Amino acid sequence: MSTVRKTFGLCCPKCGEDDHLMVEITTMARLYRDGTEDVGDHVWGAESTCGCTDCNHWATVKDFTVTEGGQP
């Protein structure tokens, strides 16, 4: 079974959750009179806001990044 830790190298540094995390993304969008349309991929970086949906801990992606030893 894949986890956020395995797929993206991220887990919560407070509770260890690695199944459901949130991250602030940047993307491009076309603007129209009646709304918007996403265009292309989305990106995030080490300074993007990241949060745990289990314990509500919020920090940056850098803080959630797993080290070689497997811990954030």
Image (cartoon, rainbow, N blue to C red):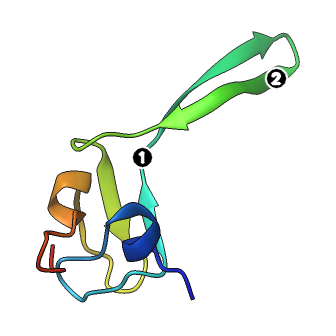
Note whether 49 is above or below 45 in the view shown.
below
Query: Which mark identifies residue 46?
Result: none
Question: Which residue is at 21% across, 69% downward?
Answer: 66
Of residue 9 and residue 31, the one placed in the foreground of this image is 9
Does 7 sit above or below residue 35? below
Residue visible at 67% across and 26% down in the picture: 40
Indicate the position of residue 8 as horizontal and vertical percent values: 40, 62
Amino acid bearing label 1: Glu
The residue that label 1 is drawn on is: 24
Provide residue 34's location: percent of width, then percent of height: 88, 19
Q: Nearer the viewer, residue 32 or 62?
A: 62
Q: Quadrant of the C terminus?
A: bottom left
Q: Residues within 10 Å of mark 2 (few under 14, many from 20)?
A: few
- Residue 47's spot in the image, x, y percent? 22, 41
Residue bearing the label numbered 2: 35
Q: Is residue 12 left or right of residue 35?
A: left
The front one of 68 and 16 is 68
Q: Could you say whether the residue bearing mark 2 is in a helix, strand or loop?
A: strand
Q: Amino acid at mark 2?
A: Gly
Count numbered badges in the picture: 2
- Up/down of 27 relative to 11, above or below: above
